[in-house]
Amino acid sequence: MIEFREFGDKEKPVVMLLHGGSLNWWNYREEAELLKPHFHVVLPVLDGHASSSRAFSSIKDNATELIDFIDSNFGGKVLMIGGLSLGAQILLEMLAQKGDICKHAFIESAAVIPSKFTHALTGPAIKSSYALIKNRRFAKLQAKSLHIRPDLFEDYYRDTCAISKTDMISILKANTSFSLPAAVSSSSAQIHVFAGSRENREILKSVKVLQKELSGCSVKILPGLYHGEFSLNHAKEYADAVLNAVANK
């Protein structure tokens, strides 16, 4: 069973937000509080992450599980789904599997170009450094490098420590080997792509791929922002973007 947090009136249109890899539902906690007067906000916990009862197997499997969850709980469709990084990759796979799963899709900081080099190094790198994850000093340096706000550190530290070595390797390998499914181009969703101007080259190249392959999608490069900062550190702006997208239909 998928673990999730819910905010707002269950009778209102559903907005689902999928957190980034090694994060958790709190990735979107502030957005949920801002959006709950208007929507029923659902924050699932992705497979392999803290409090999830499922090991991480693949992006495709996680997407299928979430589609089944929406089919069982929300009549097969929701108003909007957003995702960050790994969550955005899972969202793209959901759109490939079921093109009308949502009316609006927010794709934030998604890599859609496989990196063979990074993928090959993932297993050895995690195996050699995994013990450091529970070291608070190392974790604080890691959180700083990821531009996670200090007030989110305890959430980050607690939930990162709860991810098994096997799941961490599986998550990162899936993230670095993901490519854009061709069927996404047939989705009826209005797709909105976001990335920070200070993202790494792979993400910025991925934005160009998304723009080329998904005709009609909107693209916004956010000045001065690093990977994931839009949803993690700018909740008000993110919530406003959701409201504007839905209002414009």
Image (cartoon, rainbow, N blue to C red):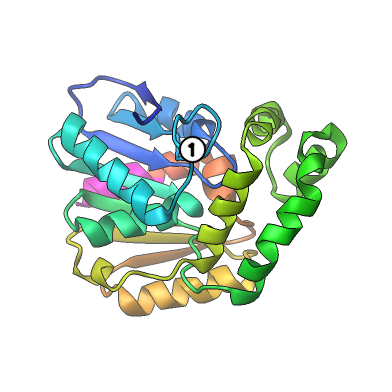
Picture residue at 70% right of the left edge, 47% below the top: 147
Q: Quadrant of residue 92?
A: bottom left
Q: State the quadrant of the N terminus.
A: top left
Picture residue at 31% right of the left edge, 24% below the top: 37
Label 1: few (<14), some (14–19) or many (≥20) C-alpha neighbours in 10 Å: some
Q: Position of residue 44 (x, y in %)?
A: 40, 34
The stretch of residues the image draws in magenta is 241-249
Q: Quadrant of residue 189?
A: bottom left
Q: Is residue 190 left or right of residue 207?
A: left
Q: Is residue 204 left or right of residue 94?
A: right
Residue type at mark 1 is Lys
The answer to whether one can see residue 107 in this image is no
Q: Residue furthest bottom?
A: 212
The answer to whether one can see residue 143 in this image is yes
Describe the element under mark 1 as helix, strand or loop: helix
User: With respect to residue 89, does 246 lie above or below?
Assistant: above
Tag 1 residue:
236
